[in-house]
Image (spheres, rainbow, N blue to C red):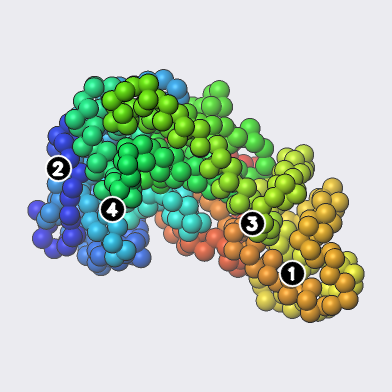
Amino acid sequence: MSHVVQIPFDNTYLHVAEALFSHQLPTPVKQPGLIRINEALAEALSIDPRQLASAEGIAVLAGNQIPEGAEPIATAYAGHQFGGWNPQLGDGRAILLGEVIGRDGCRYDLQLKGAGVTPFSRMGDGRSPLGPVLREYIVSEAMAALGVPTTRSLAAVTTGERVVRDEFLPGAILTRVARSHIRVGTFQYLAARQDFDTLRQLADHVIARHYPEAGRADNPYLSLLAQVISAQAGLVAHWQSIGFIHGVMNTDNMLISGETIDYGPCAFMENYDPATVFSSIDQGGRYAYRNQPAIAQWNLVWLAQSLLPLIDADEGLAVKQAQAALDAFGDRYLENYQRRMCAKIGIEQVDDAANGLVSELLSLMAEQRVDFTLGFRVLAEWLVWNGERDGDLDGKSGGEEYRSAGAIAAASLYPLPEQFQGWLQRWQQLLGIGSIRGNHQVREQKIDAVRSAMLACNPVFIPRNHQVERAIEAGNIGDFEPFHRLVEVLAAPFEFDPAKQDYAMPATPEQRVARTFCGT
């Protein structure tokens, strides 16, 4: 036991039912070394980051010491993986140390990923190479900065050991934080075993932990289903609005809490193409960008199926009620997606005209192979840089002042193709800017308001594949400076800094990463 590192554990999941986990200590490593502590996150969890960075703290993060109050377990779950059913999955290389209450009053899991063999390892070694640990730290923290519900990364450490995959690779362990690690596959695991008593206990735990309002509903379990559906509809809409491709949307990788989890073969789309797939194991494109909403609903069908015995004793009535909840997914998703996409072009009021303009823009982006992130970002800047607006902005007034403020630069770094001119004029008209004549001040105020709103929801920095791979390659030879630098740039994704402009640019043909890999 480590008594130096104080972590205020308050564990509840292992008291739900023993069928949901196996007690499991981490396997100690030879020579743990610190890569990074997420100090802000540690403080938000009421954990002293200085203690985590101490020798004792690093030992805890590596699984070599167990802090007081921790009760390590590996959790059980099942799942559909690429559509195929697997009744026995579980944490094959992750060990849940316990739960803490954050300063926000919410409960969080602390889990060591890559901490050794568990009863669910399925012939694996329970370890993680360094690359997947760095990737998850980079991308999960970038997603958090973008405002996407996600698991977080508290720390990353090296193990001093080699991991055997296709080659010998340095090993590492990630400390992952989540509101919980309860998955659709957790419910499937119990339903498949017809363990309905434990299923009810699990559902009650989830209601109390994540959806307390469902506990006050006439049918708490139907309300639980509806709220998970709503959370997932919002989550996937958020993914789509930033060009994020998860890559492995199996039911065991869908959290009931509505957070993004598992950053193995994930990637952000560069040139806009709805058919984009990055994962090397997704040969059929099942989890392509355009398929993510439909896959999310498919996964939720299996949650609904698992909850049927709790929704109503009459199976026919339970199916009818669950189907009605599932049918609401499409509307919930579309509502969230349209709101986010219209906001990306500065339009608050979602209507047919705005949605039509978004669709037209996406078609243009696909035809012209425009970078999804910068394509939207430069629109806000175009409003300022466009010197043809009735002579109101000739490059010597607002545009020059804005330029000198160092607030943009993406417009000059990434100009839009000429084919966008017609769309840009129609966009101006819909925004109401084109109709403002003769009143320079009113026009400027309108432009400033639209620009500010757009810059706040269109990032300039995302974790581009080639930048992530560069950080991993350097890390594999012991140089973590590119990793630290990338994490720091991505912490402020909406704030352009000319000194960091290389991080904003798409990959050159030589830099492009076409395939990503599962880190198992």
Crowdedness near tag 1: few (<14), some (14–19) or many (≥20) residues, C-alpha within 10 Å: many
> Is there any visible trace of residue 493 in the rendered image?
yes
Crowdedness near tag 2: few (<14), some (14–19) or many (≥20) residues, C-alpha within 10 Å: few
> Where's the C terminus, which quadrant?
top left
Residue nearer the viewer, 509 or 82: 82
Q: Identify the residue under disc 3.
A: 343
Q: Position of residue 132 (x, y in %)?
A: 40, 42
Q: Are marks 3 and 4 in contact (CB under 8 Å)?
A: no
Measured in 3D between alpha carbons, the distance from the residue under mark 3 to the one under mark 2, in whole angstroms, is 44 Å
Quarter residue 365 falls in: top right
Q: Position of residue 179 (x, y in %)?
A: 32, 50
Residue shown at the point (37%, 52%) measured from the top left: 152
Residue 108's label in the rendered image is: 4
Q: Identify the residue under disc 1.
A: 447
Residue shown at the point (24%, 22%) measured from the top left: 194
Q: Are marks 3 and 1 in contact (CB under 8 Å)?
A: no
Dot 3 lies on which element?
helix
Q: Earlier in the sequence, mark 2 or mark 4?
A: 2
Measured in 3D between alpha carbons, the distance from the residue under mark 2 to the one under mark 4, in whole angstroms, is 16 Å
> Is there any visible trace of residue 511 in the rendered image?
no
239 with respect to 430 (left or right): left
Q: Are marks 2 and 4 in contact (CB under 8 Å)?
A: no
